[in-house]
Every structure is written in C-alpha cells, then in structure tokens.
C-alpha cells in the first residue's frame, strides 16, 4: 500500500513532466523537430494500447483465454498494407485539409453537412464510454494502489481531476495550431514518451512476476498444467464461445478499428510529419506490438495461480503482484505505466472528438445562425468553439463513468465501442476505392449499422447494467418473438455477443451502402470529391458548383479576413498571384478557381464543412434540381467523351510529330554525310589530278629531261590516272548500289572457282610485295547463286587490303584462305598477319570514305575508302554477311558468310 | 499489366491468403512455443513482416 499523499505528488510530478515534454517538443518544432522520424511515428500509433490493453489483456486471458490476441492480430495483418493505404490517406488529408475522420467521410461524400453531423454524433456516442473506461482504469488502479476500498472524498474524485488536467493539457498543446495541416509536435512527443514508458513498465512487471515471484516461464506453465488451468490459453475453441467464427470476426474488427478509431486516424493521417515515415514505422510498430504482448499470458497464468484464493478482479493482477510483495517502487511504476496508457489515449481521443464537434457541429451552427458575417469577433468565437468542445468531451466521459461505467468491465465496454466504430468501415474504405459510392448509400448504411449496433449491443448492455429493466427481452425477444432476440437475431445463435452484433451490423451496413450507392444518382460535388479521393494524382479534372451569384474580390476577401486575419489572407492571395499569375482588384469578379482555392485555405482553419457553408453563403448557391443535375451530368459526359477524343487526337499528333522529328534528324544526318562525301571526293580527286597536271607540265616545258626521268614521270601519270579512274568507278558503283541501279547477273557458281579467280588476279601484286597466299579452301563442290564479277571484286578488295596493310616488322607475310560450312551457309575466311585493326575500328571500316591509319604507317594509305563499304553491300545483296575479326599487330580475318545451294 | 496494378494484385492476393487460411491453424490451434508464446501469434507476425518486406521490395523495384 502507498500513501495517498505520496502518490498524488508523484502524479503531479509525472504530469508536470508531460507538460514539460510537450512544451519542449513545441519549442523544437521550429528548429530541429523531435518527432520528424519513423520511430516517433510508430510510437505515436501505440495509443492503440490503452489502459484497456495494459490491465484488461491480462484480465481477458485469465478469464477467457487466448482470444485477446485477436485485438492485435488485426493490426498485424494491416501492417503490410500501411505503405499503400496510409500513404494514400495521408495525401488525401493533406490536400483536402481534412481535420478528423468524420470530416474525411463527409468531405469524400460531397462535403455533406448532415453526414458530418451524423458521424460526429455517432462517434461521440461510441467513444465516450471508451474514454470513460480509461478514467475508470485510472481510478481503479489508484484505489488498488492506496488500498482504499472505502469511498474517500479525495480519491473518489480522481477521474474528475484527471479529466480537468487533461482538458487543460489538450487546450494548451492540442489546439495550439489553428491550422489542421500543422502537426501538434509537443503532443506527439508526449505520446511517444508515454509509449516507451508503458512498454518499459509492462516488461519490468512481466520479468518480475515470471522470474522473481516464479522461477521462469517453465515454472509458471508447469504449475498451471498441474492445476489444469491452461485449457483456454492453449486452445482457441475453448477461449471463444463461437469458436473460429468469433476468432475471425474479432480479427476483422480490430483490423478496421486500428484505422478508424478517431485517435488512430488522427495520428496516422493528421499528425504525420512525413509520409516516408510510414515505410519503416510499419515494422517498428509490429515489434512494439510483440514486446507489449510478450508477458500478457505469463502474468495472467501467474495471477490465476497466485491469487486463486482471492476475489481480486483479473484486470488488476498487473498491479496486485508488486503491491502484494510490498514492492512499492515497482507498484508506482506499474501504476504510472497504466496511467500513461490511459492519458495517452485520452489526450489524442479528446483532440480528435473535440475537433469533430467544433468543425462539424459548433462552428457550422454559428455560421448558419449568423445572417451576415458582421461580427469582428468571429475568430474568437471559433477559437472558443474549439476549446469548449474539449471539456465537453472529457466531462461527458466522466459523467458516463459516474453513472453507467461501474457496471461493465474494461474489455466489454471497449469491444462494444469497437463494433460501433467499425460501422464507418464500408464508407471509409469504399470511399477510397469505389467511385460509385455516394452519400445516399453511406448515410443509409451507417444509419442501419448504427441501429443494429444499438439493438444487439448497446441495448443489452443497458439491460445487463440494470438501467433498463427488461431481462425477458434478452431471453425471449421483444413481444416474445424469438427471431428478434438481441443476442440471437434471426436465429443466429452460438456466437458471442460482440461477434454477433458485429456480424449483423456490418453485413447490413455494407448491404445498404452498396444498394444505396448503386441505385441513386450522386450530386455533382459527390462525383468531384470521389475523383479527388480516388484519383489523387489528378484532382482537378472536374469541378462542380451549384448555380451561384457573381462574387467580387472584396466580398470574398472580407469574409476570409474574418476567419484567418488580414495577414494570413494577404499571404494566401499573394501566393495565388505568384502561382497562377492572376492578381485581383477589389471590384474584379472572381473566377471560380480562386473561390475554390480560398475555400480550400479556409478548410484548413475551420474544417471542410464549415468552410463550405461559409463560401456557399457568400455565393448564395442554390441547390440543383434533378433536371439540372442530369443536364450537368450529360454535359460532363459529353465533355469527357470530347476530352477522350481530343486525347486520342493529341496522341496521334504527338506520334506524327515524333516521326517528323526522327525524319528531320535522319535528313540532317544524310545532309552531313553528303557534305562529307563532297569534301572527301574533292580531296581524293584533287590529289591525283594535281600530280598529273604537275608532271605533264614538267614534261611539256622541259623537253631536255632525261629519258629515265620522263619514264618515271609518265609511269606516275599513268598510275595516278588509274587511281583516278578507280576512284570514279568506285564512286559510281557506290552510287548505283545506293540507288539500286547496279546490274546484277546472278548465276550458279562453285565457290572455289570465284576464290581462285580472285587469287589469280592479285597474285602478281602479292608476289611483288613478298606476300604468300595460301588457299586451304576445301569445299570444292559448293555451289552458290551469285554475281561472279561483283563477288570477285569483294574478294580482290579484301586481298588488296591485306597486301596494303602488311606488317613490315614481321619476317613472313601471308594470306590464308579457309572455309567453314554448316547446314545452310558457307563462310569464306581470309586471314592475314598484317598490322591488324583496333577493336573500336571494326565497325567503322565498313563506312564510306573511312580509312584507318595505323601508327606503323607513315602516310595515309592509298585508296578511296569505299572498298569495304561496297564489299559489305555486295555481300548483303547476296543475302550474306561480311564481318571482321582482328587483333592489332597480330592478325585480321575477314569472314564472308553466304547461303549455298544444296 | 501496369506495375502498380501488379502490386495491388499481389498485395490483395497475399492479404486474403493470409487472412483466410486461419482455419488451417485450427489443426494445431495455439500450441505454446518458447514455453509461453502462442504459435498462432508468431505465425501471423512472421507472415506480416515477410509481407512488409515483399511489398516494399515491389514498390522500390517499381520506382527504379
């Protein structure tokens, strides 16, 4: 037992620490943010572990076995989808300036005020009991700690004190940012701190119970086996009334609520600093989940063994162990751990619910009841609405604790709230992925789901707690109609009440949601919002607004100033000007784009619904008739069809443009080749002509020349003339090949004959230069269909190149001819041991007017630079391939592969 | 098939396989391993972590 007057200062110090962390966190937000990392993001999401988890899990295992795990398997299954689902939600929330889950659903289905109000009221009803059980957990643990079952005037008011202090905390740190887009850094820092604190406290008490009170896991479980109390822990069927169906439905339930609980949604989407944190946070959160649940089963089993002869509630085992052993320090740590779990949840849940109340109910109510926005105090009124909704939430929870809360356990109340929250699942998930989903479907689904939830879970809970005195309804059904029994609706028995209520409420909810959406026509703004939420990459495709009056700039400007002040308004107007290059003057009539822009800005401060009401009032928007709506839809349909046609046309134009650009590039390339050709051919022609002219002039003007000299000169003139003639022949041949005007005379020839002819033609030249030609060609009977003259030209060209590029540093110079044959082709290989060709030049040598100069050659080699280019084309015309293999200073091998005739 | 479509398809298929094969666990129910941890719990954790890795790999692969 710990003295009341010791524990109160400890609590005050702990709360002061939380205030300090929040203050420090807020202060750091402008410099180096404390929360800008994935660990803090993951830790913030552990508000899923409330006091219910901290104390109630052990209680659940002790009383009914392993089924508590379903509450955590849902989030475990969800974790892999974070990266897809959470990121999409975060993006939508940031762009649409969403402020709460009710705002999210209402904005998705046409920024509908009624839907916003409906969800807010429902969520308020679902969550107040849930907050109340946190207050109750604090109160109960406090009483256990001070061992005071007697009503003490101070300790009895603990929930009230906590509610007041939490209100103060949330007002100070949860509403500091007027804009929904900004993250409450101080508050998130506190949540992360509390997440670590409660984990450490739970693990320490787990180790204490398992290893200090008992002798390890083995000891706990062997003793439990001996006493035969492990049944429901070791078997799912034994732990759940409805066996696997209960198991399945509870997993689905926790899967839904992990995202849909207002505080979870708030932390997932609105307090996220950077969407990239989602990636790593998914597995960090899973590890936390594992660590937090590691000692649940051992503590529960140990509690059943240790406290078997007492009447203590199993929910209190976690705290009872250290108290019973007189370990006051650990007892205080555990109490503060549970306190952290409860306050963490209370803080965020209160922020989320109070935002819903102020943005969906209080502010729209004030806006609707002000005929004009004449009051200069509107900013203060809005601020007051936001703040007053916080104590309203917490005092409602306190009142619930005082009046109703005593009769139910932590887990029961929590699960009833869970099923209520799950009613948002169809509209939430459907809204993200199903474009046809509309407001009518959503409202009908949610109302039906809420009604079934009330009938199958809330109503029986009231009966059981004694608030309603009609126990016979539970056993016989109303008016003795057994099919209407709240726990066995339409004869569905054998399920536990939670699974039963969940099954009927969610099934009928989904059914009406689908039917309502399929068979009703959505409003224009619903279609617009559906596109914004689903095709988040293209949000501005369609814009809908009801018929409205003209609005002047000064009118909108004056309206916005009232809500966000002149400084902010001017800043946003300037931003618009910079972004869209459009500046308005006072008497300018506004384009709707600017109005939408300002509505979006206003949403950030007062929520989507309130912003829409304020702007609609200014525009004096009239509701659309059904006929007008159909006309708009028809116009939209036409516009979409037209747009699609334009897109097709545009794609076609793009394709043509691409082809033209390619052709242009090709023409430029050809033009460049032509220029190079003219340059090269002029140069190649000039060289022999110049030498012929010079030598002829000398012969003409110098008759006294010796005969020997005359002979040399005339020989050179003849050689140069031949070269000139060859060049012209090659150029003409090249040109004819290019234009396809070359005459071809194809006949069947033996390959060896063509090779022999070519060898004979070059033998005199090879002998002069000392180069030996060795013909190893062995496939003598191979016939090919070829133009003999042209093919011989190819071979001669290759032989002459081999002779021309012999290696003077080698002792022997040779050309070897061989052949390779396969089923369809014959390859003639001509290999020399000349100077070789560098690898990077292997492709180049087949280009026109290309002559590679080796380092061993002093002068540029003679020739037109056309030979191999022509040769390649001739071989190609024979459906063959001319290729080269070579190694510099070692060898060169030309390969002519041709199809042969069988 | 576009990559994003493929990702979605894989995720949905694995998710439902993952979720709906739970009755098979019934064959062994919840055998305690390491002395105290229910097998079924570890089973879901392992699959979930594995799935996180697969999805992140697919998404990173798509980005490249």
Image (cartoon, coloured by chain):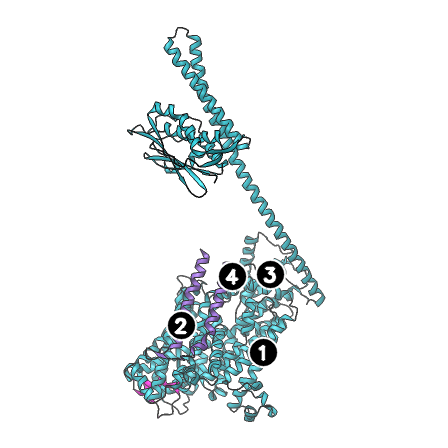
Q: Chain letter for purple?
A: B
SS at circle 3: helix
Q: Which residue is mark 3?
A: A596
Which mark lies nearer to you, 4 or 3?
Answer: 4
Q: Are marks 1 and 2 on the same chain?
A: no
Indicate the chain on which mark 1 is placed: A
Crowding around mark 3 (Cα neighbors within 10 Å: few <14, some 14 to 19, many 20+) is some
Q: Nearer the viewer, residue A886 or A748?
A: A748
Residue A334 % position (x, y) = 35, 80
Q: Are marks 3 and 2 on the same chain?
A: no
Query: Is there a contact, CB below 8 Å, between mark 1 and mark 3?
Result: no
Q: Which residue is mark 4?
A: B5
- The answer to whether residue A356 is above or below residue A323 is above
> Residue A508, which numbered label?
1
Q: Chain letter for cyan?
A: A
Q: CA distance from mark 1 to mark 2?
A: 32 Å
- Which residue lies at the image location 42% right of the left edge and 11% below the top edge? A698
Magenta residue check for A310: yes
Which mark lies nearer to you, 4 or 1?
Answer: 4
Which span of residues is magenta-colored? A306-327
Considering only order in the chain, which callout, 4 or 2, is on the residue closer to the N terminus? 4
């Amino acid at each position: 037992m710990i003295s009341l007057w010791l524990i109160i200062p400890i609590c005050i110090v702990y709360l002061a620490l939380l205030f300090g962390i929040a203050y420090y966190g807020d202060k750091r937000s402008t410099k180096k943010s404390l929360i800008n990392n994935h660990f803090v993001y993951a830790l913030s999401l552990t508000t899923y572990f409330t006091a219910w988890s901290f104390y109630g899990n052990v209680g659940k295992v002790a009383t009914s076995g392993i089924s508590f795990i379903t509450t955590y398997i849902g989030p475990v299954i969800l974790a892999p989808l974070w990266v897809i689902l959470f990121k999409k939600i975060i993006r939508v929330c940031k762009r649409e300036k969403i402020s709460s889950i009710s705002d999210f659903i209402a904005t998705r289905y046409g920024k509908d005020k009624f839907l916003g109000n409906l969800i807010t009221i429902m969520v308020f009803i679902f969550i107040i009991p849930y907050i109340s059980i946190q207050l109750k957990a604090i109160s109960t643990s406090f009483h256990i700690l001070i061992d005071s079952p007697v009503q003490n005037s101070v300790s009895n008011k603990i929930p009230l004190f906590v509610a007041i202090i939490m209100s103060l905390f949330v007002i100070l740190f949860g509403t500091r940012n007027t804009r929904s887009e900004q993250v409450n850094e101080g508050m998130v820092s506190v949540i992360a701190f509390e997440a670590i604190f409660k984990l450490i406290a739970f693990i320490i008490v787990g180790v204490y119970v398992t290893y200090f009170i008992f002798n390890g896991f083995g000891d706990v479980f062997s003793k439990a086996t001996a006493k035969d109390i492990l049944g429901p822990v070791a078997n799912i069927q034994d732990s759940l009334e409805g066996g696997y169906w209960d198991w399945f439905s509870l997993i689905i339930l926790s899967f839904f609520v992990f995202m849909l609980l207002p505080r979870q949604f708030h932390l997932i989407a609105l307090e996220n600093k950077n969407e990239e944190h989602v990636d790593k946070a998914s597995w960090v959160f899973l590890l936390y989940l594992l660590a937090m649940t590691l000692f649940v089963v051992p503590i529960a089993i140990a509690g059943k063994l240790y406290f078997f002869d007492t009447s203590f509630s199993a929910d209190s085992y976690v705290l009872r162990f250290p108290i019973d052993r007189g370990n006051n320090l650990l007892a205080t740590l555990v109490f503060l751990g549970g306190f952290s779990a409860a306050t963490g949840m209370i803080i965020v849940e209160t922020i989320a619910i109070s935002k819903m109340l102020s943005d969906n109910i209080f502010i729209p109510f004030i806006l609707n009841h002000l005929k004009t926005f004449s009051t200069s105090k509107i900013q203060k009124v809005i601020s007051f609405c936001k703040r007053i909704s916080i104590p309203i939430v917490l005092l409602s929870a306190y009142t619930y604790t005082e009046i109703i809360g005593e009769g139910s356990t932590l887990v029961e109340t929590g699960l009833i709230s869970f099923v209520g929250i799950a009613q948002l699942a169809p509209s939430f998930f459907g809204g993200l992925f199903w474009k046809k989903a509309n407001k009518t479907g959503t409202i009908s689904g949610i109302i039906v789901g809420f009604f079934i939830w009330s009938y199958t879970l809330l109503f029986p809970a009231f009966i059981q707690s004694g608030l309603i005195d009609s126990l016979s309804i539970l056993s016989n059904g109303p008016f003795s109609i057994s099919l209407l029994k709240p726990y066995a609706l339409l004869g569905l028995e054998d399920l536990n009440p939670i699974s039963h209520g969940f099954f009927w409420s969610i099934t009928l909810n989904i059914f009406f949601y689908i039917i309502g959406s399929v068979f009703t026509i959505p409003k224009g703004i619903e279609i617009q919002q559906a596109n914004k939420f689903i095709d988040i990459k293209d949000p501005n495709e369609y814009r809908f607004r009801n018929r409205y009056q003209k609005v002047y700039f000064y009118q909108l400007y004056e309206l916005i100033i009232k809500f966000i002040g002149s400084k902010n308004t001017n800043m946003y107007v300037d931003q618009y000007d910079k972004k869209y290059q459009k500046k308005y003057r006072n008497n300018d009539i506004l384009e709707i784009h600017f109005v939408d822009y300002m509505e979006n800005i206003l949403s950030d401060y007062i929520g989507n619904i309130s912003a829409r009401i304020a702007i609609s009032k200014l525009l004096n928007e009239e509701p659309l008739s059904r006929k007008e709506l159909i006309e708009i839809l028809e116009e939209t349909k036409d516009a979409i069809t037209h747009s699609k046609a334009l897109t097709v046309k545009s794609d076609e134009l793009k394709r043509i443009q691409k082809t033209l650009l390619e052709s242009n590039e090709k023409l430029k390339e050809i033009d460049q080749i032509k220029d190079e050709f003219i340059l090269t051919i002029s140069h190649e022609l000039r060289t022999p002509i110049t030498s012929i002219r010079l030598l002829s002039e000398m012969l003409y003007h110098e008759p006294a020349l010796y005969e020997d000299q005359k002979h040399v000169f005339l020989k050179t003139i003849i050689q140069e003339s031949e070269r000139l003639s060859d060049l012209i022949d090659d150029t003409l041949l090249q040109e004819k090949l290019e234009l396809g005007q070359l005459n071809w005379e194809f006949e069947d020839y033996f390959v060896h004959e063509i090779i022999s002819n070519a060898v004979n033609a070059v033998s005199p030249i090879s002998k002069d230069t000392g180069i030996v030609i060795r013909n190893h060609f062995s496939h003598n009977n191979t016939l090919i269909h070829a133009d003999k003259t042209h093919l011989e030209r190819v071979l001669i060209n290759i032989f002459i190149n081999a002779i021309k590029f012999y290696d003077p540093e080698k002792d022997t110079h040779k050309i070897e001819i061989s052949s390779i044959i396969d089923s369809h082709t014959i390859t003639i290989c001509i290999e020399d041991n000349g100077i070789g060709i560098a690898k990077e030049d292997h492709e180049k040598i087949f280009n026109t007017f290309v002559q590679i100069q080796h380092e061993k050659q002093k002068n540029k080699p003679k020739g037109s630079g056309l030979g191999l280019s022509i040769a390649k084309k001739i071989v190609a015309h024979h459906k063959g391939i001319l290729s080269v293999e070579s190694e510099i200073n070692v060898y060169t091998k030309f390969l002519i592969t041709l199809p042969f005739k069988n | 098939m576009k990559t994003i479509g493929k990702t979605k398809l894989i995720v949905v298929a694995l998710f439902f396989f993952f979720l709906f094969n739970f009755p098979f666990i019934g064959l062994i129910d919840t055998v305690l391993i390491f002395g105290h941890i229910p097998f079924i719990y570890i089973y879901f954790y392992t699959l979930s972590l594995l799935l996180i890795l697969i999805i992140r790999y697919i998404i990173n692969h798509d980005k490249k």
